[in-house]
Image (cartoon, grey):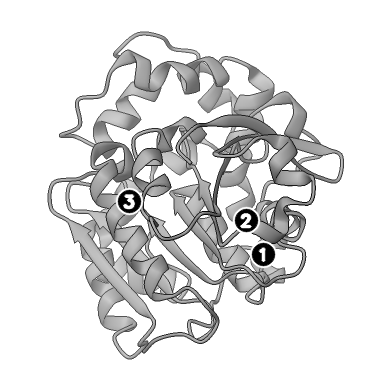
Amino acid sequence: MTERFVIKLTHGSRSFTTFSNYSEQDVFNGAGTKWTRVIFLLHGFPDENSSYDGAWPHLAQGFPNEKGLLLLAPLLRGYEESSLGPDEYSAHDVAGDVGAWIKQINPSNKVPVHILGHDWGALTAFKTASRFPELVTSIVTLGIPYLTNVFPWKLAWNLPEQLYYWSYMLTMQLSLLYRSRFEQTGRDSYLDSLWKYWSPTWKYTEEDISNIRARLSDHRIMDATTAYYRAIFNPINLINGKSKWPIDFSQVPTYFIGGAQDGCITSKLYEWERELLKDEPNVKTTILPNSGHFLHREEPQKVAELAIEFFEKYSSKTTSS
């Protein structure tokens, strides 16, 4: 089913606008028993759920022998007024949303549930797999490698350029810095500069970027979506483990896909992770030579095909090796 509907997922008092290939009535009125597979598509920053528009039809048609594939692409916490709330924007908190959604959609826990996540959606996929391994069958992550197994001082020594790539995170720590930048408009704006630097060979259009530009014009949304970065460096989160996401890959097979042209994450970090995780049979790494950070926008069909192949291989908790 390739038609797309707009539905609402919920967690507590928050609600999340979500693209789905089934109507809200189909999704919530006893249809949970008819799904053969569920795939959550989680977006990153600065971006939104429409980023999967190009990959959507390929994913929807990627399992021709299954009549009950459910695709769900939600706006993550803080990207709209209905999901604003207390300042709880750590990966742990956002993964809690995903865990709640999975329980709503797959209450019997008998259907394979996969996550395809980009950027912050990738970190959320990691944390969801870490917190709720019994709920997640397999994950594919885009634009962000595993990271949690790399000590910061080793990263600084071995890949100092990565620290430069991440220097933009300092801007996200103070509203005095990020508000004036995201208030800029036009093709030379701060938002545009991030997209251009992170995906230098991608010729995006104003239509591609206009939705997220409009979202970030609201200071409440701007403050909430940048709060993800402040949560990373919150000392409490560093102490209590909310800024870590260790995964048992024997329970949740994981596929890392990066872009060789990425100006946010050096491809050398993927190569390093490939070496660190070489003894994990349920882990795979691919670097797309012609893509940057927004690889699912740049090569939507290729990314969809790679994800479909991995999800088909790991479709149950009895995993392949």
The residue wearing badge 2 is: 91
> Horizontally, is 302 left or right of 190 in the view?
left
Mark number displayed over residue 242: 1
Q: Residues within 10 Å of mark 3 (few under 14, many from 20)?
A: many
Against 306, residue 316 (above or below) is: below
Residue positioned 33% across, 22% down in the render = 192
Q: Earlier in the sequence, mark 1 or mark 2?
A: 2
22 or 275: nearer the eye?
22
Instruction: Give the spatial CA distance, label 2 vs label 3.
Output: 24 Å
Q: Residues within 10 Å of mark 1 (few under 14, many from 20)?
A: some
45 or 168: nearer the eye?
45
Do callouts 1 and 2 mark residues in contact (Cβ within 8 Å)? yes
Mark number displayed over residue 304: 3
Indicate the amino acid at tag 1: Lys
> Horizontally, is 103 left or right of 64 in the view?
right
Q: Earlier in the sequence, mark 1 or mark 3?
A: 1
> Horizontally, is 195 left or right of 84 in the view?
left
Regarding mark 3 in the picture, which secondary structure is present there? Answer: helix
186 or 110: nearer the eye?
110
Q: Residues within 10 Å of mark 2 (few under 14, many from 20)?
A: many
Residue positioned 42% across, 38% down in the render = 52
Regarding mark 1 in the picture, which secondary structure is present there? Answer: loop
Q: Earlier in the sequence, mark 2 or mark 3?
A: 2
Indicate the amino acid at tag 3: Ala
Against 277, residue 28 (above or below) is: above
- Which residue is situated farthest in the top direction here? 186
Against 191, residue 303 (above or below) is: below
Residue 155 position in % (x across, y down)? 34, 68
Residue 210 position in % (x across, y down)? 43, 16
